[in-house]
Image (cartoon, rainbow, N blue to C red):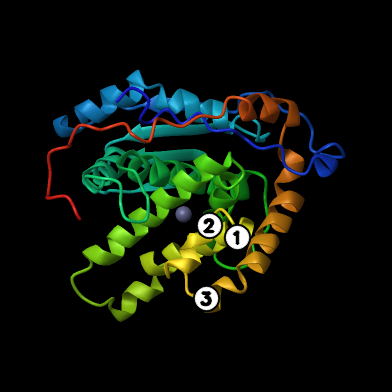
C-alpha cells in the first residue's frame, strides 16, 4: 500500500538545443501549490488519508515543477458531490475523490492478459489525468496555440510526457490508461447515442486507440505487442509514427522552451513507480470487472 500513489515520475530533458536557447524568462522554481481538501463524503476519508500519507500531491508538485509557469497553479483533491471527474479552471486543477474511488473500484483482481497489474490500473489513469489537466493549465497559462480539439491535445501532451519515462514505467502507465478506457467501453450497456459524440472529449474507444497509437508510434518495439495481439489495428498502426512525431514536434516547439532543464534533470533522476506486485485493499463498492 505504501507506494501506491507515490508518483515521483521523472521529467525528461526535452530537446536541450531548444531549451538552451529558450527566451522564456526564469520564474520562481515552484509555481505549483497543492491542497488536500477534507472530503464531504465520509466514505472518501480513507482515500484522503492515504493520499496524504503517500505524499501524493507533494510528489506531483515536485514532478510538475520544471515547467516555468507565469503564475501560481493550485492542484487540489476534493469531494465533488458524486461527480467522478477532474478538471482545470481559473488556475486550479481539481481531482475528485469520486474519480480516484472509481479507478480503485475498477482495478482488476489479477494482472490482466495484456499484462496490466492491478496497481497500474489505478496509478496509470490517475497520473494521466493529472498530466492531462496540467496540459490544459499549460495551454492557458503559457498561451500555447492548439490545432484540433483541446481535449485531444491534452491527451497527447500527457502521453508524450509518460512516454519519456523509463521504458518499464512508460509501459506500465500506458497499459493502465488503456485498461481504464477499455473498462469504460466494456461497461457500456447500450450503444452510444448520437449526442455522446458531441462531447468535447473523444469517446473512450477513440481515446483507447489514440493512446495505444502514440505509444506504438514512439516505440514500435516496446509496444509491438499492441499490434501483434490485435489491440491496435494494423491500418491505424501504419501512421502512428507520424502521429507521434507531430506531437513531439509541437511539444518541443511550444512547451520545451518553458522547461527548466536543471530542475528537469533532478526530477528525471528520481524516477520510480510502486512495485507492480503490490496488492491494494479493496474499496467497498460495485463488483469488480473481470
Ligand atoms: Zn480535459
Residue picked out by circle 3: 234
Residue picked out by circle 2: 223
Dot 1 and dot 2 residues touching (CB under 8 Å): yes
**Residue displayed at 62% across by 35% down:** 11
User: Is residue 200 placed above or below 2 in the rendered structure?
Assistant: below
Marks 3 and 1, the one that precedes in the sequence: 1
Residue, far top: 53
Alpha-carbon span between mark 1 and mark 2: 5 Å
Mark sitting on residue 233:
none
Residue 20 placement: quadrant: top right
Q: Where is residue 22 in the image (x, y as percent from the top left)?
A: 83, 39
**Does the rendering let one see residue 153?**
no
> Is ligand 1 closer than 8 angstroms to the Cβ of mark 2?
no
Q: Position of residue 33 (x, y in %)?
A: 51, 26
Dot 3 and dot 1 residues touching (CB under 8 Å): no
Q: Badge 2, how many Cα within 10 Å: few under 14, some, many 20+?
A: many
Dot 3 and dot 2 residues touching (CB under 8 Å): no
Residue 231 placement: quadrant: bottom left
Q: Badge 3, how many Cα within 10 Å: few under 14, some, many 20+?
A: few
Q: Where is residue 119 in the image (x, y as percent from the top left)?
A: 33, 38
Q: Is residue 268 left or right of residue 119?
A: right
| Quadrant including the N terminus | top left
Of 247 and 199, the residue lying toward us = 247
**Residue displayed at 37% across by 56% down:** 114
Secondary-structure class at tag 3? helix
**Does the rendering let one see residue 184?**
yes
Q: In this view, does 43 lie to the left or right of 88?
A: left
Alpha-carbon span between mark 3 and mark 1: 12 Å
Q: Position of residue 204 (x, y in %)?
A: 37, 64
Mark sitting on residue 220:
1
Q: Is residue 172 left or right of residue 289?
A: right
Amino acid at each position: 500500500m505504501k507506494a501506491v500513489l507515490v508518483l515521483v515520475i521523472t521529467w525528461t530533458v526535452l530537446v536541450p538545443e531548444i531549451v538552451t536557447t529558450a527566451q522564456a524568462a526564469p520564474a520562481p522554481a515552484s509555481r505549483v501549490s497543492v491542497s488536500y481538501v477534507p472530503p464531504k463524503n465520509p466514505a472518501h476519508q480513507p482515500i484522503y488519508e492515504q493520499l496524504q500519507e503517500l505524499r501524493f500531491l507533494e510528489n506531483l508538485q515536485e514532478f510538475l515543477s520544471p515547467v516555468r509557469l507565469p503564475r501560481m497553479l493550485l492542484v487540489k483533491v476534493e469531494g465533488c458531490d458524486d461527480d467522478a471527474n477532474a478538471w482545470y479552471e481559473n488556475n486550479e486543477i481539481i481531482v475528485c475523490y469520486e474519480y480516484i474511488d472509481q479507478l480503485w473500484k475498477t482495478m482488476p483482481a489479477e494482472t490482466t492478459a495484456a499484462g496490466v497489474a492491478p496497481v497500474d490500473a489505478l496509478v496509470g489513469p490517475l497520473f494521466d489525468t493529472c498530466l492531462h489537466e496540467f496540459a490544459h493549465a499549460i495551454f492557458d497559462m503559457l498561451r500555447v496555440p492548439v490545432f484540433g480539439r483541446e481535449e485531444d491535445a491534452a491527451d497527447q501532451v500527457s502521453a508524450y510526457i509518460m512516454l519519456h519515462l523509463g521504458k518499464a514505467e512508460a509501459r506500465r502507465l500506458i497499459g493502465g490508461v488503456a485498461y481504464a478506457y477499455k473498462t469504460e467501453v466494456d461497461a457500456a450497456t447500450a450503444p452510444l447515442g448520437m449526442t455522446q459524440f458531441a462531447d468535447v472529449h473523444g469517446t473512450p474507444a477513440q481515446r483507447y486507440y489514440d493512446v495505444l497509437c502514440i505509444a506504438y508510434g514512439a516505440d514500435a518495439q516496446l509496444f509491438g505487442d499492441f499490434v501483434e495481439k490485435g489491440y491496435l489495428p494494423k491500418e491505424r498502426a501504419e501512421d502512428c509514427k507520424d502521429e507521434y512525431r507531430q506531437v513531439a514536434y509541437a511539444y518541443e516547439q511550444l512547451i520545451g522552451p518553458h522547461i527548466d532543464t536543471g530542475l528537469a534533470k533532478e526530477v528525471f533522476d528520481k524516477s520510480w513507480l510502486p512495485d507492480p506486485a503490490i496488492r491494494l485493499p479493496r474499496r467497498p463498492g460495485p463488483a469488480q470487472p473481470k
